[in-house]
Image: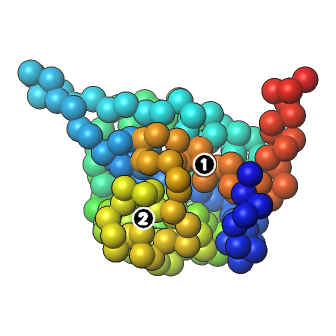
Amino acid sequence: MFSHLPRPLIERAERIRLLIMDVDGVLTDAKLLFDADGRMSKAFNTLDGHGIKMLQESGVQTAIITARSDAAVDARAAQLGIGFYRKGSSDKKAVYQVLLAETDLSEAQCAYIGDDVIDLPVMIRCGLPVAVPNAHAEVRKRAAYTTAAAGGNGAVRELCDLIMYAQGSFQAALDRYLQ
């Protein structure tokens, strides 16, 4: 599935112990839907959610860092058992540094998937920076990997699968469904 990827990329993915995700444009398609009363709603992809659960079961921790505060994301993060969830801060670098201190992980052990320039302070520091194909050009330029799937359409699942493939845990996770 990922055997065509360059060995240095696979080696980066082998080291990952924490996947950090942005929300808007990554876990969603970046559209903000408002009803007549001004309430916002978002759509999340079930493939992403199951990929996150499979990745967690393989021993990789998960985190969300988002600048927006949103009840829908609160609910989704809780539902998925996201271990570290920080919202409402546009200083993602500062939040990332707190996360590193709390987890006692190195930058090389962290992957980050983002789509906009607000994500760059973390992406340029982490071990595996990933962009979605609909990301801003400056973000794609700095990514070690760009997913084939768009944000909100399975991009996170693709990255989860890539990490598990690199770490040799993907087949075992898949085998549970093939019995």
Which residue is at a point 30% across and 38% down the rendered structure image? 70
The quadrant holding residue 141 is bottom left
Which residue is at a point 11% across and 28% down the rendered structure image? 38
The residue at which mark 1 appears reads as 158
Q: Are marks 1 and 2 in contact (CB under 8 Å)?
A: no
Say above or below: 10 vs 48: below
Q: Residue furthest right?
A: 179
Would you say 68 lies left or right of 47 here?
left
Q: Position of residue 44 (x, y in %)?
A: 43, 33
Say above or below: 153 vs 40: below
The residue under label 1 is which amino acid type? Glu
1 vs 2, front mark: 1
Say above or below: 107 vs 132: below
Q: Which mark is residue 4?
A: none
Say above or below: 59 vs 137: above
Considering the numbered disc 2 on the image, is that residue within a helix, a strand or a loop?
helix
The residue under label 2 is which amino acid type? Val
Q: What is the spatial separation of the Cα atoms under label 1 and label 2, in whole angstroms?
A: 25 Å
The reply to whether residue 12 is in sight is no
Q: Which mark is residue 95?
A: 2
How many marks overall?
2
Would you say 119 lies left or right of 82 here?
left
Q: Position of residue 33 (x, y in %)?
A: 21, 32
The reply to whether residue 14 is in sight is yes
Answer few, some or many: residues within 10 Å of disc 1's Cα (few below 14, many 20 plus, some between 14 and 19): some
Which residue is at a point 49% across and 71% down the rendered structure image? 143
Q: Residue furthest front?
A: 4
Considering the numbered disc 1 on the image, is that residue within a helix, a strand or a loop?
helix
Which residue is at a point 28% across and 62% down the rendered structure image? 90
Coloring scheme of the render? Answer: rainbow
Q: Position of residue 147 (x, y in %)?
A: 53, 56
Would you say 134 lies left or right of 128 here?
left
